Image (tube, rainbow, N blue to C red):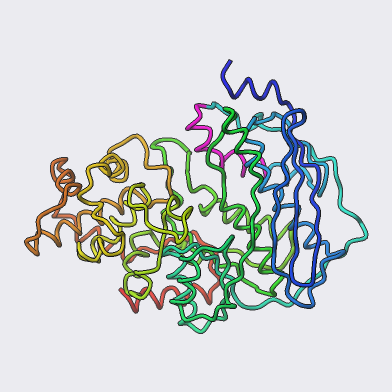
Amino acid sequence: MNKFDKFRSENPVFVYKSYNVTETDSEIEVSFDFSIPSLADFKPSWTFSKPQGVKISGNRTLERMFFSLGMAEAVSYWKAVCAPEMRVECGELDSEQVKWWKKLYFMGLGEFFYVNGISADPDSFINIVPVGSFDSSSEECPRELKGCLVPIGGGKDSALTIETLKNAGMECRCYAINKRCSIEATVSAAGLPEDALIISKRHFDRSLINLNNAGYLNGHTPFSAIVAFSAEITAYLNGLKYVVLSNESSANESTVAGQDVNHQYSKSFEFERDFHSYEEKYLKSGVYYFSFLRPLAEFQIAEMFVSHRKYLPVFRSCNLGSKVSPDIWCGECPKCLFVCLILSPFLSSDELISVFGRDMLNDEKMLEYFIELIGQSDHKPFECVGSIDEVNLAVSLAIRRMNADGEELPLLFREYMERRLYDIGTIDSRYEACRKSFNNENLLPEQFRDILIKEMERLL
Protein backbone atom coordinates (compact mmCIF):
# COMPACT_ATOMS: atom_id res chain seq x y z
CA MET A 1 0.00 0.00 0.00
CA ASN A 2 1.41 3.41 -0.95
CA LYS A 3 1.65 6.31 1.51
CA PHE A 4 -1.40 8.09 0.12
CA ASP A 5 -3.71 5.10 0.58
CA LYS A 6 -2.09 4.11 3.89
CA PHE A 7 -2.47 7.54 5.49
CA ARG A 8 -6.04 7.92 4.21
CA SER A 9 -6.96 4.55 5.65
CA GLU A 10 -5.40 5.32 9.03
CA ASN A 11 -6.76 8.91 9.19
CA PRO A 12 -10.23 8.96 7.62
CA VAL A 13 -11.25 12.39 8.95
CA PHE A 14 -9.75 15.89 9.09
CA VAL A 15 -11.69 18.39 11.21
CA TYR A 16 -11.93 22.17 10.84
CA LYS A 17 -13.19 22.56 14.40
CA SER A 18 -13.38 26.31 14.90
CA TYR A 19 -11.96 29.77 14.42
CA ASN A 20 -11.70 32.36 17.15
CA VAL A 21 -11.40 36.14 16.85
CA THR A 22 -9.92 38.35 19.57
CA GLU A 23 -9.09 42.02 19.37
CA THR A 24 -7.23 44.83 21.07
CA ASP A 25 -7.30 48.52 20.26
CA SER A 26 -4.75 48.01 17.49
CA GLU A 27 -4.85 44.35 16.41
CA ILE A 28 -7.18 41.52 15.46
CA GLU A 29 -6.04 37.95 15.99
CA VAL A 30 -7.77 35.10 14.20
CA SER A 31 -6.84 31.62 15.38
CA PHE A 32 -7.90 28.33 13.79
CA ASP A 33 -8.35 24.89 15.30
CA PHE A 34 -7.72 21.96 12.94
CA SER A 35 -7.41 18.32 13.93
CA ILE A 36 -6.43 14.94 12.56
CA PRO A 37 -7.98 12.87 15.38
CA SER A 38 -5.53 10.63 17.24
CA LEU A 39 -2.61 12.07 15.26
CA ALA A 40 -2.21 15.84 15.57
CA ASP A 41 -3.90 19.14 16.38
CA PHE A 42 -2.99 22.37 14.60
CA LYS A 43 -3.58 25.92 15.78
CA PRO A 44 -2.29 28.39 13.17
CA SER A 45 -3.26 32.04 13.49
CA TRP A 46 -3.16 35.46 11.83
CA THR A 47 -2.70 38.97 13.20
CA PHE A 48 -4.24 41.90 11.31
CA SER A 49 -3.81 45.59 12.07
CA LYS A 50 -7.05 47.10 13.30
CA PRO A 51 -7.89 50.59 12.01
CA GLN A 52 -9.71 52.92 14.34
CA GLY A 53 -13.50 52.83 14.25
CA VAL A 54 -13.85 49.37 12.68
CA LYS A 55 -16.52 47.19 14.27
CA ILE A 56 -15.48 43.54 14.59
CA SER A 57 -18.00 41.95 16.93
CA GLY A 58 -21.19 40.83 15.20
CA ASN A 59 -19.85 41.73 11.73
CA ARG A 60 -21.21 38.98 9.47
CA THR A 61 -19.07 40.08 6.55
CA LEU A 62 -15.86 39.68 8.53
CA GLU A 63 -17.09 36.38 10.01
CA ARG A 64 -17.45 34.93 6.51
CA MET A 65 -14.03 36.23 5.51
CA PHE A 66 -12.26 34.88 8.59
CA PHE A 67 -13.92 31.48 8.19
CA SER A 68 -12.92 31.37 4.50
CA LEU A 69 -9.32 32.23 5.34
CA GLY A 70 -9.39 29.17 7.58
CA MET A 71 -10.63 27.01 4.69
CA ALA A 72 -7.69 28.26 2.62
CA GLU A 73 -5.25 27.55 5.46
CA ALA A 74 -6.67 24.08 6.16
CA VAL A 75 -5.37 22.50 2.95
CA SER A 76 -1.75 22.85 4.15
CA TYR A 77 -2.52 20.65 7.15
CA TRP A 78 -5.02 18.31 5.47
CA LYS A 79 -2.46 17.29 2.86
CA ALA A 80 -0.29 15.54 5.48
CA VAL A 81 -2.66 12.56 5.37
CA CYS A 82 -5.16 13.55 2.62
CA ALA A 83 -8.05 12.37 4.79
CA PRO A 84 -11.00 11.32 2.59
CA GLU A 85 -13.40 13.40 4.71
CA MET A 86 -13.11 16.97 5.96
CA ARG A 87 -15.63 17.82 8.64
CA VAL A 88 -16.28 21.56 8.84
CA GLU A 89 -17.76 22.21 12.28
CA CYS A 90 -17.91 25.99 12.01
CA GLY A 91 -18.78 28.61 9.44
CA GLU A 92 -21.27 28.22 6.64
CA LEU A 93 -21.03 26.19 3.42
CA ASP A 94 -23.74 25.40 0.90
CA SER A 95 -23.39 22.76 -1.84
CA GLU A 96 -21.99 25.23 -4.37
CA GLN A 97 -19.35 26.42 -1.91
CA VAL A 98 -18.34 22.81 -1.27
CA LYS A 99 -17.81 22.38 -5.03
CA TRP A 100 -15.82 25.63 -5.11
CA TRP A 101 -13.46 24.52 -2.34
CA LYS A 102 -13.05 21.02 -3.79
CA LYS A 103 -11.98 22.58 -7.11
CA LEU A 104 -9.47 24.90 -5.41
CA TYR A 105 -8.00 22.04 -3.38
CA PHE A 106 -7.76 19.67 -6.34
CA MET A 107 -6.37 22.14 -8.86
CA GLY A 108 -4.19 23.91 -6.32
CA LEU A 109 -2.68 20.57 -5.26
CA GLY A 110 -1.94 19.47 -8.83
CA GLU A 111 1.82 19.73 -8.31
CA PHE A 112 1.56 18.04 -4.89
CA PHE A 113 -0.23 15.06 -6.43
CA TYR A 114 2.16 14.89 -9.39
CA VAL A 115 5.39 15.07 -7.36
CA ASN A 116 4.12 12.53 -4.80
CA GLY A 117 2.94 10.12 -7.51
CA ILE A 118 -0.69 10.34 -6.36
CA SER A 119 -3.52 9.47 -8.74
CA ALA A 120 -6.25 11.58 -7.19
CA ASP A 121 -9.81 11.62 -8.48
CA PRO A 122 -11.38 15.10 -8.50
CA ASP A 123 -14.71 13.79 -7.20
CA SER A 124 -13.59 11.37 -4.50
CA PHE A 125 -10.24 12.73 -3.27
CA ILE A 126 -12.07 14.64 -0.52
CA ASN A 127 -15.61 14.82 0.80
CA ILE A 128 -16.23 18.16 2.51
CA VAL A 129 -19.00 17.77 5.11
CA PRO A 130 -20.33 21.06 6.59
CA VAL A 131 -21.97 20.71 10.01
CA GLY A 132 -21.67 24.26 11.40
CA SER A 133 -23.63 27.47 10.95
CA PHE A 134 -23.12 31.17 11.59
CA ASP A 135 -24.60 33.03 14.53
CA SER A 136 -27.82 34.45 13.12
CA SER A 137 -27.46 37.53 15.32
CA SER A 138 -24.48 38.82 13.32
CA GLU A 139 -25.19 41.51 10.73
CA GLU A 140 -24.05 42.60 7.29
CA CYS A 141 -21.71 45.59 7.67
CA PRO A 142 -21.28 47.45 4.39
CA ARG A 143 -18.36 49.88 4.24
CA GLU A 144 -17.59 52.85 2.04
CA LEU A 145 -14.61 51.71 0.00
CA LYS A 146 -12.14 53.59 -2.20
CA GLY A 147 -8.52 53.30 -3.26
CA CYS A 148 -6.25 50.33 -3.98
CA LEU A 149 -4.49 47.68 -1.95
CA VAL A 150 -1.53 46.26 -3.90
CA PRO A 151 -0.05 43.01 -2.55
CA ILE A 152 3.74 43.36 -2.69
CA GLY A 153 6.05 40.36 -2.79
CA GLY A 154 9.30 42.22 -3.44
CA GLY A 155 9.53 41.15 -7.08
CA LYS A 156 9.42 42.99 -10.38
CA ASP A 157 5.71 42.46 -11.10
CA SER A 158 4.28 44.13 -8.01
CA ALA A 159 6.90 46.90 -8.29
CA LEU A 160 5.68 47.63 -11.82
CA THR A 161 2.05 47.67 -10.67
CA ILE A 162 2.59 50.07 -7.79
CA GLU A 163 4.81 52.36 -9.89
CA THR A 164 2.27 52.51 -12.73
CA LEU A 165 -0.75 53.12 -10.51
CA LYS A 166 1.07 55.70 -8.39
CA ASN A 167 2.17 57.63 -11.48
CA ALA A 168 -1.42 57.56 -12.76
CA GLY A 169 -2.56 59.29 -9.57
CA MET A 170 -4.31 56.31 -7.98
CA GLU A 171 -4.61 56.20 -4.19
CA CYS A 172 -2.56 53.16 -3.23
CA ARG A 173 -1.49 51.25 -0.17
CA CYS A 174 0.63 48.11 -0.19
CA TYR A 175 0.04 44.75 1.48
CA ALA A 176 2.41 42.03 2.63
CA ILE A 177 2.23 38.84 4.64
CA ASN A 178 5.02 39.07 7.20
CA LYS A 179 7.82 41.62 6.93
CA ARG A 180 10.69 41.31 4.44
CA CYS A 181 13.46 43.75 3.60
CA SER A 182 12.82 43.70 -0.17
CA ILE A 183 9.14 44.54 0.38
CA GLU A 184 9.96 47.54 2.54
CA ALA A 185 12.66 48.59 0.05
CA THR A 186 10.17 48.39 -2.82
CA VAL A 187 7.71 50.65 -1.01
CA SER A 188 10.53 53.09 -0.27
CA ALA A 189 11.78 53.05 -3.87
CA ALA A 190 8.23 53.81 -5.01
CA GLY A 191 8.38 57.01 -2.94
CA LEU A 192 5.50 55.96 -0.70
CA PRO A 193 5.44 56.77 3.02
CA GLU A 194 6.28 54.04 5.51
CA ASP A 195 2.68 53.77 6.69
CA ALA A 196 1.54 52.95 3.14
CA LEU A 197 2.60 49.36 3.84
CA ILE A 198 0.10 47.21 5.74
CA ILE A 199 1.57 43.98 7.10
CA SER A 200 -0.41 40.98 8.31
CA LYS A 201 1.34 38.33 10.33
CA ARG A 202 0.82 34.66 9.51
CA HIS A 203 1.70 32.24 12.30
CA PHE A 204 2.26 28.75 10.89
CA ASP A 205 1.81 25.77 13.22
CA ARG A 206 5.15 24.00 13.12
CA SER A 207 3.60 20.75 14.35
CA LEU A 208 3.09 20.03 10.67
CA ILE A 209 6.86 20.02 10.16
CA ASN A 210 7.12 17.26 12.76
CA LEU A 211 4.72 15.17 10.70
CA ASN A 212 6.66 15.90 7.52
CA ASN A 213 9.89 14.84 9.23
CA ALA A 214 8.15 11.62 10.29
CA GLY A 215 7.37 10.80 6.66
CA TYR A 216 3.88 12.18 6.23
CA LEU A 217 2.97 13.78 2.90
CA ASN A 218 4.35 17.20 1.99
CA GLY A 219 4.39 19.49 -1.01
CA HIS A 220 3.16 22.61 -2.76
CA THR A 221 -0.18 24.20 -1.80
CA PRO A 222 -2.13 27.08 -3.40
CA PHE A 223 -0.54 29.84 -1.31
CA SER A 224 -1.88 32.64 -3.53
CA ALA A 225 -5.38 31.68 -2.41
CA ILE A 226 -4.29 32.52 1.14
CA VAL A 227 -2.98 35.84 -0.19
CA ALA A 228 -6.37 36.45 -1.82
CA PHE A 229 -8.47 35.91 1.29
CA SER A 230 -6.11 37.73 3.65
CA ALA A 231 -5.82 40.68 1.24
CA GLU A 232 -9.62 40.90 0.99
CA ILE A 233 -9.82 41.08 4.79
CA THR A 234 -7.13 43.76 4.90
CA ALA A 235 -8.76 45.84 2.16
CA TYR A 236 -12.16 45.65 3.87
CA LEU A 237 -10.74 46.60 7.27
CA ASN A 238 -8.94 49.59 5.78
CA GLY A 239 -11.78 50.81 3.56
CA LEU A 240 -10.03 50.02 0.26
CA LYS A 241 -12.08 49.15 -2.83
CA TYR A 242 -9.63 47.23 -5.02
CA VAL A 243 -7.24 44.38 -4.30
CA VAL A 244 -4.84 44.80 -7.22
CA LEU A 245 -2.78 41.69 -7.91
CA SER A 246 0.20 41.53 -10.28
CA ASN A 247 -0.33 38.09 -11.82
CA GLU A 248 0.34 37.84 -15.54
CA SER A 249 -1.11 35.79 -18.40
CA SER A 250 1.97 33.53 -18.36
CA ALA A 251 0.71 32.05 -15.06
CA ASN A 252 -2.03 30.28 -17.02
CA GLU A 253 0.43 27.86 -18.69
CA SER A 254 0.64 24.30 -17.35
CA THR A 255 3.92 23.36 -15.68
CA VAL A 256 3.80 19.77 -16.99
CA ALA A 257 3.59 19.28 -20.75
CA GLY A 258 0.28 17.75 -21.83
CA GLN A 259 -1.22 17.78 -18.32
CA ASP A 260 -3.34 20.18 -16.31
CA VAL A 261 -0.72 20.56 -13.57
CA ASN A 262 0.07 24.20 -12.87
CA HIS A 263 2.42 25.30 -10.08
CA GLN A 264 0.80 28.73 -10.42
CA TYR A 265 -2.86 27.60 -10.42
CA SER A 266 -3.90 30.06 -7.69
CA LYS A 267 -2.24 32.82 -9.76
CA SER A 268 -4.10 31.79 -12.92
CA PHE A 269 -7.00 33.64 -14.51
CA GLU A 270 -9.22 30.63 -13.82
CA PHE A 271 -8.71 31.03 -10.07
CA GLU A 272 -8.97 34.83 -10.28
CA ARG A 273 -12.34 34.53 -11.98
CA ASP A 274 -13.53 31.88 -9.50
CA PHE A 275 -12.42 33.96 -6.51
CA HIS A 276 -14.07 37.07 -7.91
CA SER A 277 -17.36 35.16 -8.19
CA TYR A 278 -16.98 33.68 -4.70
CA GLU A 279 -16.46 37.14 -3.22
CA GLU A 280 -19.54 38.56 -4.91
CA LYS A 281 -21.81 35.69 -3.91
CA TYR A 282 -20.55 34.66 -0.47
CA LEU A 283 -18.21 37.25 1.09
CA LYS A 284 -20.15 40.29 -0.08
CA SER A 285 -17.54 42.73 1.19
CA GLY A 286 -17.70 45.07 -1.80
CA VAL A 287 -13.96 44.61 -2.40
CA TYR A 288 -13.06 44.05 -6.07
CA TYR A 289 -10.27 41.51 -6.64
CA PHE A 290 -8.35 41.46 -9.94
CA SER A 291 -4.89 41.32 -11.46
CA PHE A 292 -3.65 44.52 -13.10
CA LEU A 293 -0.99 42.76 -15.19
CA ARG A 294 -3.21 39.87 -16.37
CA PRO A 295 -3.26 41.12 -20.01
CA LEU A 296 0.56 40.92 -20.18
CA ALA A 297 3.18 38.17 -20.45
CA GLU A 298 6.26 37.97 -18.23
CA PHE A 299 8.41 39.16 -21.14
CA GLN A 300 6.40 42.37 -21.53
CA ILE A 301 6.51 42.98 -17.79
CA ALA A 302 10.30 42.53 -17.75
CA GLU A 303 10.81 45.08 -20.54
CA MET A 304 8.53 47.58 -18.84
CA PHE A 305 10.08 46.95 -15.42
CA VAL A 306 13.67 47.72 -16.46
CA SER A 307 12.60 51.22 -17.49
CA HIS A 308 12.17 51.90 -13.76
CA ARG A 309 15.79 51.31 -12.85
CA LYS A 310 15.42 52.48 -9.26
CA TYR A 311 13.99 49.04 -8.42
CA LEU A 312 16.91 47.02 -9.81
CA PRO A 313 19.00 47.16 -6.61
CA VAL A 314 16.10 46.26 -4.31
CA PHE A 315 13.75 43.79 -6.01
CA ARG A 316 13.88 40.09 -5.07
CA SER A 317 11.91 37.10 -6.37
CA CYS A 318 13.82 34.17 -4.91
CA ASN A 319 11.79 31.87 -2.64
CA LEU A 320 14.90 30.34 -1.09
CA GLY A 321 16.49 33.75 -0.60
CA SER A 322 13.34 35.06 1.11
CA LYS A 323 13.99 32.69 4.01
CA VAL A 324 17.09 34.61 5.12
CA SER A 325 17.39 38.17 6.34
CA PRO A 326 17.99 40.37 4.50
CA ASP A 327 16.43 38.46 1.63
CA ILE A 328 18.74 37.71 -1.28
CA TRP A 329 18.99 36.14 -4.72
CA CYS A 330 20.30 32.65 -3.94
CA GLY A 331 21.55 32.39 -7.53
CA GLU A 332 21.12 28.61 -7.48
CA CYS A 333 17.40 28.01 -8.10
CA PRO A 334 15.25 28.00 -11.26
CA LYS A 335 13.38 31.15 -10.19
CA CYS A 336 16.62 33.12 -10.02
CA LEU A 337 17.65 31.78 -13.42
CA PHE A 338 14.29 32.59 -14.99
CA VAL A 339 14.38 36.21 -13.83
CA CYS A 340 17.95 36.51 -15.10
CA LEU A 341 16.95 35.11 -18.50
CA ILE A 342 13.84 37.26 -18.91
CA LEU A 343 15.88 40.40 -18.13
CA SER A 344 18.86 39.38 -20.28
CA PRO A 345 17.72 41.15 -23.48
CA PHE A 346 17.44 44.45 -21.63
CA LEU A 347 20.47 44.47 -19.31
CA SER A 348 24.15 44.01 -20.08
CA SER A 349 26.07 41.02 -18.72
CA ASP A 350 27.73 43.25 -16.12
CA GLU A 351 24.36 44.64 -15.05
CA LEU A 352 22.92 41.13 -14.67
CA ILE A 353 25.85 40.07 -12.50
CA SER A 354 25.42 43.23 -10.43
CA VAL A 355 21.71 42.51 -9.86
CA PHE A 356 22.06 38.83 -8.95
CA GLY A 357 25.51 38.84 -7.38
CA ARG A 358 26.84 36.06 -9.61
CA ASP A 359 27.16 34.97 -13.24
CA MET A 360 24.36 32.42 -13.55
CA LEU A 361 24.60 32.25 -17.34
CA ASN A 362 28.08 30.70 -17.02
CA ASP A 363 27.15 28.35 -14.18
CA GLU A 364 27.13 24.69 -15.24
CA LYS A 365 24.91 23.83 -12.26
CA MET A 366 22.10 25.87 -13.87
CA LEU A 367 22.11 23.81 -17.07
CA GLU A 368 19.31 21.42 -16.04
CA TYR A 369 17.03 24.30 -15.04
CA PHE A 370 17.87 26.08 -18.30
CA ILE A 371 16.85 23.03 -20.32
CA GLU A 372 13.52 22.91 -18.47
CA LEU A 373 12.87 26.62 -18.94
CA ILE A 374 13.42 26.51 -22.72
CA GLY A 375 11.00 23.59 -23.10
CA GLN A 376 13.50 20.80 -23.74
CA SER A 377 12.22 18.74 -20.81
CA ASP A 378 8.95 17.04 -19.81
CA HIS A 379 8.08 19.87 -17.47
CA LYS A 380 9.05 23.40 -16.52
CA PRO A 381 10.57 23.99 -13.09
CA PHE A 382 7.99 23.89 -10.31
CA GLU A 383 8.35 27.60 -9.68
CA CYS A 384 6.54 30.79 -10.65
CA VAL A 385 8.21 31.19 -14.03
CA GLY A 386 7.07 32.45 -17.42
CA SER A 387 6.03 30.55 -20.52
CA ILE A 388 8.44 28.51 -22.61
CA ASP A 389 7.88 30.71 -25.68
CA GLU A 390 8.83 33.92 -23.93
CA VAL A 391 11.92 32.39 -22.34
CA ASN A 392 13.04 31.33 -25.82
CA LEU A 393 12.35 34.82 -27.15
CA ALA A 394 14.35 36.42 -24.33
CA VAL A 395 17.31 34.08 -24.87
CA SER A 396 17.27 34.66 -28.64
CA LEU A 397 17.22 38.44 -28.23
CA ALA A 398 20.06 38.31 -25.71
CA ILE A 399 22.16 36.12 -28.01
CA ARG A 400 21.58 38.50 -30.93
CA ARG A 401 22.61 41.47 -28.78
CA MET A 402 25.77 39.73 -27.60
CA ASN A 403 26.70 38.67 -31.12
CA ALA A 404 26.20 42.24 -32.37
CA ASP A 405 28.45 43.54 -29.59
CA GLY A 406 31.13 40.95 -30.26
CA GLU A 407 30.63 39.51 -26.77
CA GLU A 408 31.48 35.88 -26.07
CA LEU A 409 28.34 33.85 -25.41
CA PRO A 410 28.01 32.42 -21.89
CA LEU A 411 27.78 28.69 -21.25
CA LEU A 412 23.97 28.45 -21.24
CA PHE A 413 23.62 30.38 -24.47
CA ARG A 414 26.25 28.19 -26.15
CA GLU A 415 24.12 25.21 -25.16
CA TYR A 416 21.14 26.93 -26.78
CA MET A 417 23.09 27.36 -30.01
CA GLU A 418 24.26 23.74 -29.97
CA ARG A 419 20.65 22.58 -29.70
CA ARG A 420 19.89 24.58 -32.87
CA LEU A 421 17.11 26.53 -31.19
CA TYR A 422 18.35 29.97 -32.24
CA ASP A 423 16.27 31.17 -35.20
CA ILE A 424 17.42 34.66 -36.11
CA GLY A 425 14.93 34.91 -38.97
CA THR A 426 11.88 34.92 -36.67
CA ILE A 427 13.17 37.01 -33.78
CA ASP A 428 11.78 40.37 -34.92
CA SER A 429 8.31 39.04 -35.73
CA ARG A 430 8.10 37.16 -32.40
CA TYR A 431 9.36 40.21 -30.52
CA GLU A 432 6.85 42.53 -32.15
CA ALA A 433 3.96 40.11 -31.58
CA CYS A 434 4.84 39.69 -27.90
CA ARG A 435 5.24 43.41 -27.24
CA LYS A 436 1.83 44.16 -28.73
CA SER A 437 -0.05 41.25 -27.15
CA PHE A 438 -2.89 42.06 -24.78
CA ASN A 439 -4.81 39.15 -23.28
CA ASN A 440 -8.46 40.12 -23.08
CA GLU A 441 -9.22 37.38 -20.55
CA ASN A 442 -8.99 39.72 -17.59
CA LEU A 443 -11.12 41.46 -14.97
CA LEU A 444 -9.61 44.95 -15.23
CA PRO A 445 -12.12 47.75 -14.61
CA GLU A 446 -12.08 50.21 -17.51
CA GLN A 447 -10.13 52.84 -15.58
CA PHE A 448 -7.30 50.40 -14.85
CA ARG A 449 -7.33 49.04 -18.39
CA ASP A 450 -6.83 52.56 -19.73
CA ILE A 451 -3.93 53.15 -17.32
CA LEU A 452 -2.18 49.95 -18.39
CA ILE A 453 -2.61 50.61 -22.11
CA LYS A 454 -1.24 54.15 -21.77
CA GLU A 455 1.77 52.85 -19.83
CA MET A 456 2.44 50.22 -22.51
CA GLU A 457 2.29 52.87 -25.21
CA ARG A 458 4.56 55.23 -23.24
CA LEU A 459 7.27 52.66 -22.53
CA LEU A 460 7.16 50.50 -25.62
Q: Quadrant of residue 42?
A: top right
Q: Going by the image, does 319 lie left or right of 95?
A: left
Is 104 colored magenta in this rendering?
yes
Q: Residue at x 31, y 51 (%)?
A: 337
Q: Residue at x 31, y 59 (%)?
A: 356
Q: Residue at x 57, y 64 (%)?
A: 176
Q: Going by the image, does 26 lie left or right of 454?
A: right
Q: Quadrant of the N terminus?
A: top right
Q: Quadrant of residue 311?
A: bottom left
Q: Quadrant of the C terminus?
A: bottom left
Is 218 colored magenta in this rendering?
no
Q: Is residue 307 above or below residue 169?
A: above
Q: Is residue 43 above or below residue 340?
A: above
User: Residue lying farthest bottom?
Assistant: 169
Residue 175 vs residue 448, the one in the foreground: 175
User: Residue lying farthest left?
Assistant: 406
Q: Which residues are magenta?
A: 101-117
* Residue 145 picture location, percent across and down: 69, 76
Q: Is residue 268 above or below residue 55?
A: above
What type of secondary structure mainly makes up the magenta span?
Answer: helix
User: Exactly how many numbered labels are in the figure?
Assistant: 0
* Residue 164 picture location, percent across and down: 45, 76
* Residue 99 picture location, percent across and down: 69, 42
User: Residue lying farthest top?
Assistant: 1
* Residue 210 picture location, percent across and down: 62, 35
Q: Residue at x 49, y 63 (%)?
A: 246
Q: Going by the image, does 315 lie left or right of 238?
A: left
The answer to whether residue 15 shows anywhere in this view is yes
